[in-house]
Image: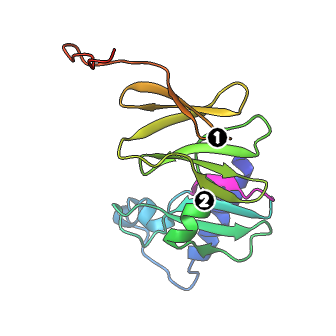
Amino acid sequence: MKRLALFLWASLFAFQANPAGKFALTIDSIMRGPQLYGYEPTGVRWSGDGARIYFQWKQASDPRIKPADTYVVARDGSGLRKLTDDEVKLAPPAAGNSTRDKQRTVYARDSDIFLYDASNGTTRQITKTDDAETNPRFTHDEKRVAFTRGNNLYVIALDSGATEQMTDIRPAGTPRPPDE
């Protein structure tokens, strides 16, 4: 993985190189940091079929406060392109919890839980609520996903969508509902 990141970084640096554009080697130019040489790719990951590499990257010309964009490149290094916002949502997640066989990854995005299936490259939304769901993890049997919502632990079955609240943690002084 480290060699892949180094290869990508070197390839991307080559795209930014301008051999005809000389500049004075001064303290000011040396201290420009990423604005001089660009930013290291992050979130490097393979597509499910192993044909493409996805990563986040910020070009040297991008403003410092701008978030990194998502790019894709073919396995052989050809076809580098920036993804559209819609394509980013369908790309393999940069982080998440994967099954032992690495075929499915569960992750949180926009306060909901999503499941990415590497075998067919699809993403399925697991939850869609007004509450923020975070920290999704596969259960040991990999048939359910545990996650937190409102400081409580929930488990959702992937086949049926049945959701079970596992804890009932409330702030001190909060009364219990009358039916309990």
The residue carrying mark 1 is: 160
Residue 42 covered by magenta stretch: yes
> Outermost residue toward the left?
173
Which amino acid lies under the numbered mark 1 shown in the image of this protein? Ser
Q: Does the magenta portion include 104? A: no
Few, some or many C-alpha atoms within 10 Å of disc 1 (few <14, some 14-19, many ≥20)?
few
Which tag is nearer the camera, tag 1 or tag 2? 1
Asked if residue 155 lies left or right of residue 150, the reply is right
Gap in angstroms between the C-alphas marked 1 and 2: 33 Å
Residue 82 in the image, given as x and y percentages of width and height = 56, 73
On the image, the x and y values in percent for residue 3 come to: 73, 50
Q: Which residues are magenta?
A: 41-49
Closest to the observer, 10 or 161:
161
Q: Position of residue 175 (x, y in %)?
A: 22, 16
Residue situated furthest front in the rendering = 179
Q: Is residue 84 left or right of residue 3?
A: left
For disc 2, the neighbor class at 10 Å (few under 14, some 14 to 19, many from 20) is: many
Q: Is 101 left or right of 145, judged from the image as shown?
A: right
**Who's the residue at 50% across and 60% down the image?**
39
Q: Nearer the viewer, residue 45 or 146?
A: 146
Write down the residue under mark 2. 55
**Viewer-nearest residue: 168 or 32:** 168
Q: Which mark is residue 138?
A: none
**Residue lying furthest bottom:** 20
In what element is the residue under mark 2?
A: strand
